[in-house]
Image (spheres, grey):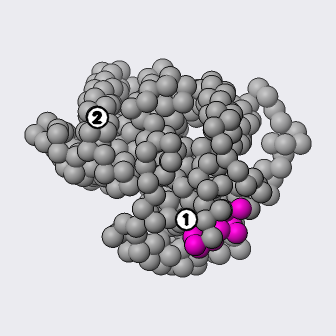
Amino acid sequence: MRNPSFNGLLAVAVLGLLVGTWGLVDRLMHGLKPVAFGSYVPWGLWVAFYLFFLGLSAGAFLVTTMTYVFRMTRFERIGRLSAFTVLIALLCEVLFITLDLGRMARIYRFLLTPSFTSIMTWMFVLFNAMLAIYALKTFFLMREDLVHWAKDRERSGSGLYRLLALGKENYGDADHLKDENRVHILSMISLPVGILFYGTNGAFFAILMNRPIWNSALTPLLFIVAAILSGGALIALLTHVFMRDDELVTALGRAVFAALVVFLFLQSLQFFVGYQTGVTMIVTSLNLITSGPHSWTFWVVHLLIGSLVPLLIFIMRPHDSRAVAWACFFIVITFISVRFNFVVPDLAVYKLEGLEHTFYHERLRTDYVPNLNEWLVSVWVISLGLIAFLLGARWLPVVSSRRGGMEHAS
């Protein structure tokens, strides 16, 4: 990939990695002492980012499913890019949720003493299954180009490509058919695995009885639509940046537009039903979203910049691929506010009347605001993911396919 913005993005990502390292070292040395969340609000910014990248991976997963399971050839050109995007998003997901754990070293207990009646155990199992499936799928999708690049002595890094091709020196029609079949089989396996993985993440929140907004049959559905919306917007944006396929970008834009309308409709139902119940905890949680200290993230970031502006662009300029890409960009960068307003307000309500006057400690407060350490660690993880994506797009055949008629621009 030779893109005018590549060097600039890479420089920003490297700078973010360097700046964020201070927060990461502080987190690794002192555990969760540097963070702002506590006993009453045990999940904060990092869980919101976990859900954010979960949605991005789910949208890319949907594209690969349409391409390699249902044989929708229209999306073939972005199938490989989508599979690679799933891998990077999964990497960011696991880093955020691992750093959120109080005792990261105890993750081995999922392997040694798993409890298969626990949704968290199944989240761990299904995550690793998704990671393995998409690592293999991405490899088989790229192997043809890796073999050809390894034989190109004028290409820098040919030795690395020989290593990545696992020593394979020739690649013919029979090899192509075998790898195509392997990708199809892996995609068939990933379909139920992915549905279960993303479904269990939604169910994990929905079954919590003392969380009035989460504890709803609407929660898993909102998770699914939110994933289609944010992940679809990301893929449309990447298609514009890497492929310059105007027809495909506008087609994806129409799907994102429909997902945005459905998501806003479901969100309005959540507020309407919640307020109609008159239950104090539910109303208080919703009030925190609409009129609490972080309400600007809901009204300005989510509804204005992340919803109204894209809706106007989709309606007024539906055939302008550049405008559609900008609309998708606004959706992606603002969607963290949706995740933040899902995680924090339901935790920031005292579940017992008068509890706030009983115990006094900074860890026993519900007025949570992410502190510098949490933001620095977040910058580090996002920068690492961005570097991995940029280097992969630059040095690996992520957006190239000889048989698909695409040429790599390096």
Q: Is residue 44 visible?
A: no
Image quarter hosting the N terminus: bottom left
Q: Amino acid at mark 2?
A: Ala
Q: Position of residue 384 (x, y in %)?
A: 55, 66
Q: Position of residue 200 (x, y in %)?
A: 61, 30
Q: Is residue 162 visible?
A: yes
Crowding around mark 2 (Cα neighbors within 10 Å: few <14, some 14 to 19, many 20+) is: some
Q: Is residue 111 above or below residue 365?
A: above
Residue 131 lies in what quarter of the image?
top right
Q: Position of residue 188 (x, y in %)?
A: 63, 25
Crowding around mark 1 (Cα neighbors within 10 Å: few <14, some 14 to 19, many 20+) is: few
Q: Is residue 391 above or below residue 75?
A: below
The one of 121 and 71 positioned closer to us in this rendering: 71
262 magenta-colored = no
From the image, tell me which residue sits under label 2: 251
Do the CB atoms of the residues marked 1 and 2 lie less than 8 Å apart? no
Q: Is residue 343 above or below residue 202?
A: below
Q: Furthest-right residue in view?
A: 112
Q: Amino acid at mark 1?
A: Trp
Magenta region: which residues?
154-162
Residue 251 lies in what quarter of the image?
top left
At a point 51% along the width and 35% down the height, the residue shown is 64
The one of 161 and 234 positioned closer to us in this rendering: 161
Q: CA distance from mark 1 to mark 2?
A: 28 Å
At a point 66% along the width and 55% down the height, the residue shown is 147
Q: Position of residue 6 (x, y in %)?
A: 40, 69
Is residue 49 left or right of 317 when viewed as pictured? Answer: right
Classify mark 1: helix, strand or loop: helix
Classify mark 2: helix, strand or loop: helix
Q: Nearer the viewer, mark 1 or mark 2?
A: 1
Residue 395 disc label:
1
Is residue 233 left or right of 188 when viewed as pictured? Answer: left
